[in-house]
Image (spheres, rainbow, N blue to C red):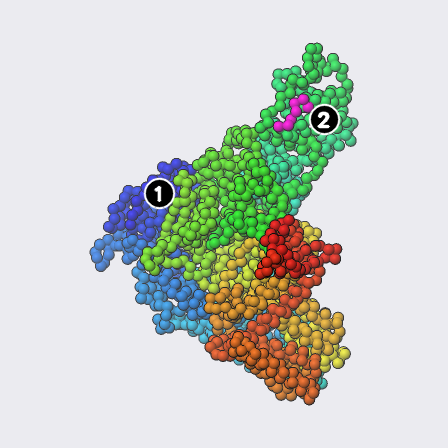
Amino acid sequence: MSRQRTASQPYNIIPIHDLLVDHPSSHYPEVRAAQAALRTTGDLRKPPYIQWAPHYDLLDWLGYFFGFQLDNIRNQREHLVLHLANAQMRLNPPPDNIDTLDHAVLRRFRRKLLQNYTLWCGYLGRRSAVWLSENRRHENDLRRELLYVALYLLIWGEAANLRFAPECLCYIFHHMALELNKILEDYVDENTGRPYVPYVTGENAFLNAVVKPIYDTISKEVGNSNNGTNPHSKWRNYDDINEYFWSRRCFDKLKWPIDVGSTFFVVDGRKRHVGKTGFVEQRSFWNLFRSFDRLWVMLVLFLQVAIILAWEQEVRGRGFPWNSLRDADVRVKCLTMFLTWSVMRFIQSLLDFGMQYSLMSRETLMVGVRMLLKFLASIVWAVVFGIMYSKIWTQKNRDGKWSDAANKQVINFLLAVAVFILPEALAVLLFIIPWVRNFVEETNWRIFYMFTWWFQTRIFVGRGLREGLADNIKYTLFWILVLSTKFVFSYFLQIRPMIKPTKTLVNVTDIKYEWFEFFGGSNRFAVGLLWLPVVLIYLMDLQIWYSIYSSFVGAAVGLLDHLGEIRNMEQLRLRFQFFASAIQFNLMPEEQLLNSSGIKSRFKDAIHRLKLRYGLGRPYKKLESNQVEAYKFAWVWNEVITIFREEDIINDRELELLELPQNDWNVRVIRWPCILVCNELLLALGQAKELVDAPDKWLWYKICKNEYRRCAVIEAYDCLKHFLLTIVKRGTEEHSIIMVLFQEIDHAIEIEKFTKTFDLSALKKIHEKMDGLLKLFSEPKKTDLNKVVSAVQALYETVKRDFYVEKRTMQQLMEDGLAPRSDTGKSLLFQNAIQLPKDDDERFYRQVRRLHTILISKDSMHNVPRNLEARRRIAFFSNSLFMNMPHAPQVEKMLAFSVFTPYYSEEVVYSKEQLQKENEDGVSTLYYLQTIYNDEWENFMQRMRREGVANEKELWSNKLRELRLWASYRGQTLSRTVRGMMYYYRALKMLAFLDAASEVDIKEGAHELGAVRQSSGLDGVGSEKQPSMRSGSSLSRASSSISQLYKGHEYGTALMKYTYVIACQIYGAQKDEKKPQAEEILQLLKNNEALRVAYVDEVSTGRVEKEYYSVLVKYDQQLEQEVEIYRVKLPGPIKLGEGKPENQNHAIIFTRGDAVQTIDMNQDNYFEETLKVRNLLEEFKYQHGIRKPTILGVREHIFTSGVSSIARFMSAQEMSFVTLGQRVLANPLKVRMHYGHPDVFDRFWFLTRGGISKASRVINISEDIFAGFNCTLRGGNVTHHEYIQVGKGRDVGLNQISMFEAKVASGNGEQVLSRDVYRLGHRLDFFRMLSFFYTTVGFYFNTMMVVLTVYAFLWGRLYLALSGIEGSVEANASNSNAALGAILNQQFIIQLGLFTALPMIVENSLELGFLNAIWDFITMQLQLASIFFTFSLGTKTHYFGRTILHGGAKYRATGRGFVVQHKSFAENYRLYARSHFVKAIELGLILTVYAGFSPVAKGTFVYIALTISSWFLVISFVMAPFVFNPSGFDWLKTVDDFSEFMNWIWYRGGVFVKSEQSWEAWWKEEQDHLRTTGLWGKLLEVILDLRYFFFQFGIVYQLGIANGSKSILVYLLSWIYILVAVGIFVVVSYARHKYSAREHIYYRLVQFLVILLVILVIVALLKFTQLTFTDLFTSLLAFLPTGWGLISIALVFRRFLENTALWKIVTAMARLYDTLFGVIVMSIVALLSWLPGFQSMQTRILFNEAFSRGNDQVARCELVVTFSYSVSEDEWVTSVVLMYDVKLWLKLGGYISAVVLIPVHRFLADHCLSLITA
């Protein structure tokens, strides 16, 4: 193994191999100290069989002994040195010897890194292998700690997929550390008599002997999963592998060195196969009950008691419910709740036993014993309660009253109840004192284990999860309020109103059933159907109440956090004067005293923030007295504004109006941005005119009441003075006149006699003259000297003549120095005294433009900047600085961090072809972007014109790269993400400079920047390339950039504190295939110094064999090429689980720092927000509750809201979740998880606990949230911080959104099965469990319940209508109103779902203002947001329910592109047929049948009142895919879509046909979940499918042919119709197959005979039976659902039917049904397409305005010509079809379409395109 180092060896961040290299980080003594500590090999025994070199260090020593890879050692060496150096930099006070590694730094790091290992040892009762003395501090002790830390990092760095099993790593580390101890203690091997050598040693020994066997086992288990389709219970996932190491058996079975013959490695066979460990994932809806049984017990018990009390109250008229409890009978009836409770415990134990039985083995015998005992105990309790309760009533009935004996039985029952609820009482007690429970659970004492054994299984995670008392109180009060409201509402508005209709229905005896009645005249089934929707709503409406209260609590928390105080530029204007101080206070570190964290310091901070927030003490005055602070503030603000210009969200003029100019003209006040001081000078002049006779003090007092006005007056005066003295030559008489004039003005002001000396009414004239003079300087190259002279002379004459109160003679003026001494023989005054600055003096002319703006501006400039995004960002940034945040440390003392982005093959930069490609309507992507971002396009063109581009056409040739980047920065591309994340690097360099800059540096820097600006103007704004550390010529940034002043150390500091790693999994393959993504990624590397790319490299070593490597690359600026830094060999392919987490896992070893921020490929960042990253990282140091945070949640801004209306809907929904929703989850509910958002992880905490996501196949498809689950279970703490935000893109098309929601809903379905959800449901306290349920899987479950409620309501109404019960009840007028009222009440409760929009309204009110929020809501409703959200409801319901029942969850790539393409009907049908269309047709059929047969529905109003919400659901399910589809109602496209759909339906294809080509291939794919589902899934599917047969049963009795018969024979005989229909279909199909091709006449004959037979049968039935023509159509409503039901059941049994002739019939029938469904949906679309004006409304209003503008500006006439030449010689074409869509917008709306057949000459046909162009 070669370990030679060379000076040219590539390095990642620090050249550790040679610290003499000229690199900025090499100058830090902390880096040298850390490296020196690693070199202390000293007297260590050297590894055998190698030549030890002097430069080897401790990691080399470990590598030789234990067989680690060289690049793993190099990687972890830099990792360790960088972390220790950064940690030592943060020491306060600094160590005495900065060249030596501080022992405390290493000890803290060792404790943190090995904390999980220490807990694991304590849990298993093993002594830790880390042998250290806590008292001694000497070199050997330091070295020993370094060896332990380095050993763990080396194990972790090479563990590959084993990193998902953190306790497996603990096991490996434990044994290797023991071997390390033997080496350090000079043990002698008993077998050889030689010094001890580890069992695993040699080249790549660790990978081959330790990692590879376990990796191969995981790989084989994944193979057994059959790509995740096999049941989870049949194979071991990552969690099972890891949890094997939670028991002591791992030491006995695996041993060390690892015994590959252990049962752990057996993956086949039941005898020796280890199987599942810790938990068995079983697919069932019962998991929701198992995991959250406490919730369901509460709901069921309250429902039972409420029904008892409501019955007594309504039937016996007892008034309020508590009055009923005075009756002993009622009290005893209420005791049945404990019987119910015991039965639910029995169900729980039965489910535990049934689902987890496979965990039982010899080694886990106690698990089985516990489950069996709990099962038996639950049976005993149920029996005991049953017997004791029956005894109470027996005794009471025997005595005829509540005698003493009966009361004694009640007391005995209550004593049993007390014993039964004793564990719950104990839980309540421990909830009140949470620290006791935490102590019991976290302490590994055997007595505590014995005490808690009965209540919960002992596992390594999920211990000590209780929060502090303060947090307990907060979320307990929240849930008490929610539950109280819910129960009061449920009792009075749900349960109690149902009692009377129920009693009425039960007591009705004269019901005339319309069919054969199976239930013998009992109405109990009807009562059950009446109650079913109410019970379903009762079970789900807690979600609604949670939404309502969380909205208000979130708003309150937001208000306390000071969110939304600055919402717009006007509010910023009012507080900008305090803004400078806020930047200084929050972003500029101050010297921190040793006790800065004390209460006194916090109190001072609070007072200071109060002063800042409300302007107490005028804190901005400090800046006027401190030029250094003013310069710092100006630089920070100007850098922000400059980057706005680079991003093209402001133009050059707005840049000047927004910037804070350097104080070049000796102005005595802060030079506020022009937008703040505009109009103020004119107002001051107005005040002066009004107060012409007032004394100086009063006038100045009135002006100074407005700070900006005071500054405007002083700045205008100082600048005017400087301007005139600059343009008039020094040494001339005119120059001295101006000097004297200003001296007189200054003296008059000083002695407070300005108003007495000067005539204020003349200021207006002077202002006009000054305006005229400054206008001449507006264009430097066009300034006319003679005009300037004339203007100055006019100004002088006005001052001389009108300004003085006491008029002076010429002699007096000459004596006072205000006129030339003698003008004989001289030219006119000022004629030879004016000297114009050079044309390229940009510094001077910019100041003149500013002065002119201040002088003449009458506009308040509320619309500056014009761009809404720029306004929003400025407002949020300024507001955030008045919020509470930790103080920023110096950059050197901040926590180091990485940003981490997984990337696969998404867009990096849009290509030229992508930008130019047009859709069907001629709209290209670039044109689409130009219309959406029209102001940003204008700003871009202004920038390009400044760089020499004359027009847009030149962009494609001269500035193509800039054009592509401009478009890419407005999409969801990797380049946008990289640009945003590299702002961290840019910000840290600037902040490092400001931290270290002295007062001299600041002042010199100000002049230097001014000089640079003078020479360069605005050249270079917005160039793509970032500044390089080594290349001064590459600093092609804005001239105002502070980077011009950097001294070099800033680059080193920033690199040590920040690195950005992109996990481009297939980058190597993309390079080999020369794909454009590889070239663009290389370009990103080239332009961004802190960017690194990690990828997996596949290297072929033979015909089949391959080796896999994790590779890290960067761009070397000196070599000007990509260089490989590390290459770490892997045990095999990385993708054993889900793709994204595996991609993250392989690359995470290359990240650095204490924290890592996870950023998705669709995210962005903002420079002004990156300035606050130091503050954010400081949060890790503070307690939030009783724990320090391990995940810092960060707020997001959805930047795609303006792309389309549905993007806006998605944005609004997402915004309410990522802001208000997560705010409440973090505080007060304490259950915030990780949701794939830009959260910041405590890196070392997570790398020792399984990483930042989970990767098991299918079960962890929503990989990100499992990081939050894992964090909470392992005692972490997740917080949420809203003073910093990150941009995020969302899907913008309906199909993209639906696929995303399908993925998330499927992921939630899998979460229901997971061990993490089960453990959180049981280990969290009751109220946190409620919060957890209703914000994760409970949300999707309750969404599904909403749809099921509609189903239950409609099916119940259909049953009541068709059975005759509804008619019988209706006949009794006194009862009908009560029943109808109860039904309408149900509908009213369903409408409470509208309150789920409340979070969105409340959050918008908080941040935008109430009126804006209401207007936004109304606008969204007008854009049919309700249809979108209802449609989304169906998507979530379908995929969540299907996943729990059958599985089938999978990753769905959405693309995230712009939606400008029309989606065909066939594509929409494939996506939504099963999830929406079929359900909508079913509900529509129910509503139609109900309308026809219900006596209640005969009245139009009643029918509408009953069914309006259901019809809205049906319409939404059917129409949403077309309403939100570009050109969704274009007539020609509709015709084409129908043709394409029919071709797709009937195309039979072959073996390799895709679902996009053939209906049959799609149909098989759509049913795949039924092939892999289990027995219970199939059984439940069949039961659900039986509902389709009810139509036939109910309707056949209503037909005339039934003749009023109620016999069961009517129903049975109706099946003859089904059999005949199927028979006819089979005969016709057979005839078509056999005769249609060759003997077509026979096929026609068969058709004729079949039709003739059908007609004869119908005529016979009409003649000889009671059949009517109406029956023929009504019967279709009965028999069509039956056919669909038969097909659905046949699909369940596909495995048995597939190889039979019956399957062909099923396939053919299914094709006909899909054709029918498609025609039904298409007919609605066609009707709306045909209606005039509907297409225009849909495109203009519903999709998005920009797309409409694009459509309108594309050519109005489309000409499609098809022709064929005739064989005649007359050169005429006989069949030319001109199809044109005139698209003339008429007053009535709509389009004119025509098809014309005309003969034309061949010449015209050949030149058709020329004609079209003409």
Query: Element under label 2?
Result: helix
Q: Is residue 850 left or right of residue 59?
A: right
- What secondary structure is the magenta-colored segment mainly? helix
786 within the magenta span = yes
Q: Are marks 1 and 2 in contact (CB under 8 Å)?
A: no
Residue 466, placed above or below residue 563: below
Mark 2 is surrounded, within 10 Å at the Cα level, by few (under 14), some (14 to 19) or many (20 or more) other residues, namely some
State the residue position of label 2: 769
Q: Position of residue 1605 (x, y in %)?
A: 67, 87
Q: Amino acid at mark 1?
A: Gln
Q: Position of residue 1580 (x, y in %)?
A: 54, 75
Lower position in the chain sequence, tag 1 or tag 2:
1
Q: Quadrant of residue 842?
A: top right
806 within the magenta span = no
Residue 1698: in sight, yes or no? Answer: yes
Q: Which mark is residue 764?
A: none
Q: Residue at x 67, y 78 (%)?
A: 1673
Residue 68, placed above or below residue 1697: above
Q: Is residue 146 left or right of residue 1738?
A: left
Closer to us: 660 or 1707: 1707
Please provide the residue range marked out in magenta. 781-787
Q: Position of residue 1429 (x, y in %)?
A: 63, 61
The extreme bottom residue here reads 1664
Q: Residue at x 69, y 89 (%)?
A: 1664
Closer to us: 562 or 1602: 1602
Query: Element under label 1?
Result: loop
Closer to us: 20 or 1623: 1623
Residue 331: in sight, yes or no? Answer: no
State the residue position of label 1: 9
